[in-house]
Image (tube, coloured by chain):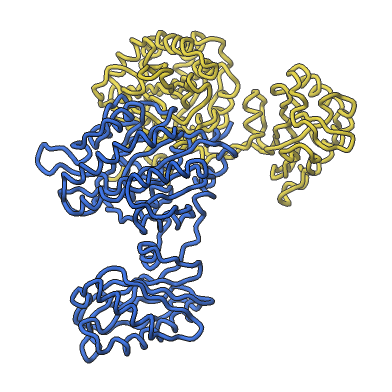
Chain colours: A blue, B yellow
Amino acid sequence: MDVEILKSLLIDGSKGKIVLLVMDGLGGLPVEEGGKTELEEAITPNMDALAKKSTLGLHQGIRPGITPGSGPAHLSLFGYDPLEYQVGRGALSALGIDFDLHKDDVAARGNFCTVDEKGVITDRRAGRIGTDVGEKLCDLLNEKINIPGVEVFLRPVKEYRFLLVMRGEGLKANIQETDPQTVGEKTLTAKAMDPGSEKAAKIIQEFVKQAEKILVNEHPANMLMLRGFAQLPNWPTFPQRFGLKPAAIAMYPMYRGVAKLVGMNSLPAAHSYEEEIDMLEANWKDYDFFFVHIKKTDSYGEDGNFEKKVHEIEKVDALLPRILALDPAALIITGDHSTPCAMKYHSWHPVPVLLYSKLCRPDGIDHFGERACLRGGLGVRFPAYELMPLALAHAGRLEKFGA
Amino acid sequence: MDVEILKSLLIDGSKGKIVLLVMDGLGGLPVEEGGKTELEEAITPNMDALAKKSTLGLHQGIRPGITPGSGPAHLSLFGYDPLEYQVGRGALSALGIDFDLHKDDVAARGNFCTVDEKGVITDRRAGRIGTDVGEKLCDLLNEKINIPGVEVFLRPVKEYRFLLVMRGEGLKANIQETDPQTVGEKTLTAKAMDPGSEKAAKIIQEFVKQAEKILVNEHPANMLMLRGFAQLPNWPTFPQRFGLKPAAIAMYPMYRGVAKLVGMNSLPAAHSYEEEIDMLEANWKDYDFFFVHIKKTDSYGEDGNFEKKVHEIEKVDALLPRILALDPAALIITGDHSTPCAMKYHSWHPVPVLLYSKLCRPDGIDHFGERACLRGGLGVRFPAYELMPLALAHAGRLEKFGA
């Protein structure tokens, strides 16, 4: 209902442009008692100056204590409650490798695995074969699999993981996974869970039968398992929901993919932060919402490299004047989730947010960091999906509710 | 469900009195970088002294980023989620001009407009005729309209706007609007949208036919359009929900109207803040909830007159000792929404709240202002409709939940 009300309040023809700058995994932790977080440690004169004129806070991507994956974390930032808008893993895998999934395709995540002579699984990851081996096996299957009336695509993801996509008429994805999630058992049959999925299930069964024969002499990856059968969701798009013409600027396919999922226009892959800002400038006139994704803050968080994560934040700070020179009506600087170097992993910790607009009520805070954001006017642990309505308001795009 | 639980916890016969003092449009913004808001600028020794003993915070009237109209903003303060409790525009218009709408009346908002000789609308606002012209046209229609079995009332609102009310048996309001919302088209037929509304729709059609003839020689207002057909909602009343006997004290009809909508007793119109407090004192024994409405903070906000808005806040501060002398068990001082002078309009910015009671846990804050409230125990951006349960608790009116 809230979404419908928001839509009814959108002002036709309003022009305020919004930039959502996401430093992936931005939130952090001190690595020693009494120490600073990565963002607190970073020297960020531009963000600090902006903080004085902004409203700050800390968002919670999903729900209390829930560590967000990248997909749901970004959906939440895009204004979609990720518990309401769930994407099947197969579709997410396709997005993650830039596979151009069509509307009626059925996608699944696959694992190469090892089975014994009776077909009993002995290693669910086939001894963690290298990505090069995974690629070779996908090529082999793409060449030999032959199922009349349907196209089948295999794409390597990483190591033993791959993507399977079926393309044909009348396919539905409500199919039982073939991965029993344990060793010591045989793979399961891909049964249809509803009548509409019968056709696709039969194709999967035929695919598995052929694949088993093709892989029989490979070692250790002599079998495969499938899970997360999914199609592209049929959601109201970002332009429909928010009346914005959006562009996504990102270096990695996963983030362009999630943006495309909600109907954003994905600009070509950038190769550096500078190039991302070049693209922002070059496309400024043609869109009114820009999602700009910064990846390496997360990567260095996952590596546990505190100094390098700090340095990435400082590099983004140095680029901020170029964004501000475009004079966005609203600018959000935040992360999708926390990736504290101290944990080397995504975490549930709330994520600092800076919302800048000429219409902000300043909080009286003079720098951007986790502890500073505790005193901000956006509040603490608010749902990340509240940021979009707030951005629309600050960009002058919403009219009053009721008389 | 929350409402039912709250009701089940109400303590019979508890006596604590609650005052809700609403400074309309209280929340503000600095007009220059680094400046103060209207409330921060105001010299408010009484509120500041009270803040030390109170719990503070910032409420959000409707939802994140949503700018509240006066009706929904007050409903939220009265403990009604305004998205759940929506009032039709016709009924709101009646409230706004103090029209005594009966339970089964159907009300609509009207515009006088200009049509050409073919009945095509050429000006939806009839050249913005003056209020005096609108009054004259309403008088003319009241005199000449004659529909057997039903009473029809026309009341001027402002300029080209008027209120239409039908009173009779078996009327329902699910009727298509006659306003096509654009020029270059004829007015639409007031069709019934469900069988129960057939009778009222026929009456409206007859009314429009007669009105067209009566207005034909007027210029420029030679036709009218109707929208927002509505009846009084059938909601659980404020006394039913909260076990309180409520009185509304306000200078303007709109606010008495919204109070009446939830079953408050509206005291006669006051003509000054002093008179409002006189009425509070005079009626102190007869009620246990008082809604006191201060209008001009909003009016000066809409005018963009920073100094005068500050001065109105100071005037209210000077009256505070008289309220405190009555020894309310709980006193809430807040606004219904923000009306920053810098914007000359209602806004979505959260609104400062002070909740005083002898049972408050003080926040350690020594003044009442937007930035001070950021550190308050009520939190930031909490829904305004949470204030009523908090007030009931602080007034000793709620028992423990569960054993």
Against A102, is B26 above or below? above
Give the mark count. 0
Against A77, is A331 above or below? above
State the residue at coordinates (23%, 91%).
A118
Q: Is residue B40 visible?
A: yes
How far across and down, in percent of the image, does residue A151 sit?
A: 46, 79
Quadrant of the drawing holding the C terminus of chain B: top left
How far across and down, in percent of the image, does residue B32 sit?
A: 41, 17
Q: Is residue A310 left or right of residue B5?
A: left
Front residue of B325 and B294? B294
Against A193, is B126 above or below? above
Front residue of A147 and A33? A147
How far across and down, in percent of the image, does residue A399 sit?
A: 55, 34
Q: What is the quadrant of residue A257 in the picture?
A: bottom left
Q: Is residue B20 visible?
A: no
Q: Is residue B265 left or right of residue A202?
A: right
Q: Residue furthest left?
A: A33
Q: What is the quadrant of residue B400 in the picture?
A: top left
State the residue at coordinates (34%, 18%).
B368
State the residue at coordinates (38%, 13%).
B41
Q: Is residue B50 left or right of residue B207?
A: left
How far across and down, in percent of the image, does residue B19 sit?
A: 42, 21
Q: What is the quadrant of residue A366 in the picture?
A: top left
State the residue at coordinates (51%, 83%).
A149
